[in-house]
Image (spheres, rainbow, N blue to C red):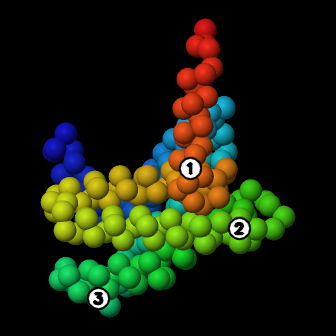
Amino acid sequence: MAGGWRALLRAARRYPWPTNVLLYAALFSAGDALQQRLRGGPADWQQTRRVATVAVTFHANFNYVWLRVLERALPGRAPRAVLAKVLCDQAIGGPVAVSAFYAGMSILQEKDDIFLDLKQKFWNTYKSGLMYWPFVQLTNFSLVPTHWRTAYTGLCGFLWATFLCFSQQSGDGTFKSAFTFLHMKEAGAVERPPEK
Ligand SMILES: *[C@@H]1O[C@H](CO)[C@@H](O)[C@H](O)[C@H]1NC(C)=O
């Protein structure tokens, strides 16, 4: 297990771009599959494929380039540099990634207005991201031991992808809509008579 993890990290260092593409495809696909499970109903693999397509064509590459640009502009792990990177990421990287996700999904779903979701959900989603990512990044750099950071970042990315897919398909971009949904579902599960 530890050996496999180390081999994975080594491969990631040697082949950062393909690893990034695979990682993003996996995180977003798994996130979409999870939120579909939680919402109930039959699995919509076409939807998962669209999510993976957006992640592979846009997010994996954008993230790859963006993180390098940020690191070059604001190198190092000193608190000031980390804080500046977090701020830049929230000011530029976050909005770009959220917009590309909503618009990209709408294009693949062949919606009439590819900017409608974006217009309706962007601010909510952006605000949710502002509550989430700076917290994730700062804990990453201050609390999480170095050898767990990749896994921690992956886990947080997975949770975010799950939330993003839920928001795109049935939420409105607020954490509240996701939690309300989960809560109602749980309450419903209690009231419903057991199946089979
Ligand atoms: C967590 O820290 C590592 C470096 O130790 C970095 O590569 C990674 O991007 C960070 N993740 C987040 C979400 O800040």
Mark 1 vs mark 3: which is more N-terminal? 3
Foreground: disc 1 or disc 3: 1
Instruction: Say which residue label 3 marks.
Output: 74
Query: Looking at this view, is 97 or 108 the one in front?
Result: 97
Percent x, y of residue 38:
55, 37
User: Quadrant of the rendered structure where residue 151 is?
Assistant: bottom left
Find the distance from the CA under tag 1 to the CA under tag 3: 35 Å
Q: Is residue 154 left or right of residue 167?
A: left
Q: Is mark 2 within 8 Å of ligand 1?
A: no
Q: Does the rendering let one see residue 97?
A: no
Q: Identify residue type, mark 3.
A: Leu
Instruction: Say which residue label 2 marks.
Output: 120
Find the distance from the CA under tag 2 to the CA under tag 3: 33 Å
Q: Is residue 1 left or right of residue 116?
A: left
Q: Identify residue type, mark 1.
A: Ala
Query: Looking at this view, is 129 or 20 the one in front?
Result: 129
Q: Residue at x 55, y 54 (%)?
A: 176
Q: Secondary structure at mark 2?
A: helix
Mark 2 vs mark 1: which is more N-terminal? 2
Q: Identify residue type, mark 2.
A: Gln
Number of numbered markers: 3
> Label 1: how many residues lie within 10 Å, few (<14), some (14-19) or many (20+)?
some
Pointers 2 and 1 in contact (C-beta within 8 Å): no
Q: Residue at x 80, y 61 (%)?
A: 111
Q: Secondary structure at mark 3?
A: loop
Instruction: Say which residue label 1 marks.
Output: 178
Query: Looking at this view, is 76 or 168 the one in front?
Result: 168
Residue 37, labelled with which disc?
Answer: none
Quadrant holding the C terminus: top right
Q: Does the rendering let one see residue 4?
A: yes
